[in-house]
Amino acid sequence: MSMLETRPSPTVLGGHALTRRERVVLAELAEDVTLEEIATRLFVTRNTVKSQVRSVYRKIGVSTRAEAVAWAEAHGIR
């Protein structure tokens, strides 16, 4: 996880970069876990994770978890 925090954020649609937390959430989406499990790992509510996921999807221009994971892998976020 330390690599996620030290890498610069890739530029995405409209020049909006992903925040550090959005990169962490995006990396977590690649795991076989539910949003509830991600929330527990990150010590936040499920609704917070849902909001962050929506923000990530909007910024990277995807609409599904599979597309987001493929985008993350293509951009070295894991």
Image (spheres, rainbow, N blue to C red):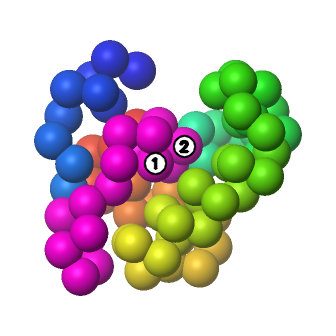
Residue under the image location 70 percent in, 24 percent down: 43
Task: In the rendered view, tell whether residue 66 sits above or below residue 9.
Answer: below
Report the side of 33 relative to 54 (left or right).
right
The local crowd at label 1, few if under 14, some if 14 to 19, many if 20 or more residues have their Cα within 10 Å, is: many
Residue under the image location 18 percent in, 34 percent down: 7
Which range is magenta? 11-27
Element type at mark 2: helix
Badges 2 and 1: C-beta atoms under 8 Å apart?
Answer: yes
The local crowd at label 2, few if under 14, some if 14 to 19, many if 20 or more residues have their Cα within 10 Å, is: many
Element type at mark 1: helix
Observer able to see residue 27: no
**Count of marks, rendered view:** 2
Which amino acid is tagged 1?
Answer: Glu
Which amino acid is tagged 2?
Answer: Val
Residue under the image location 54 percent in, 43 percent down: 25
Residue ID for mark 2: 25
Q: Residue 22 carries which label?
A: 1
Q: Nearer the viewer, residue 73 or 15?
A: 15
Which quarter of the rendered picture does the C terminus lie within?
Answer: top left
Check if residue 18 falls in the magenta segment: yes
Task: In the rendered view, tell whether residue 70 sits above or below residue 29.
Answer: below
Residue 28 image point, x, y percent: 58, 38
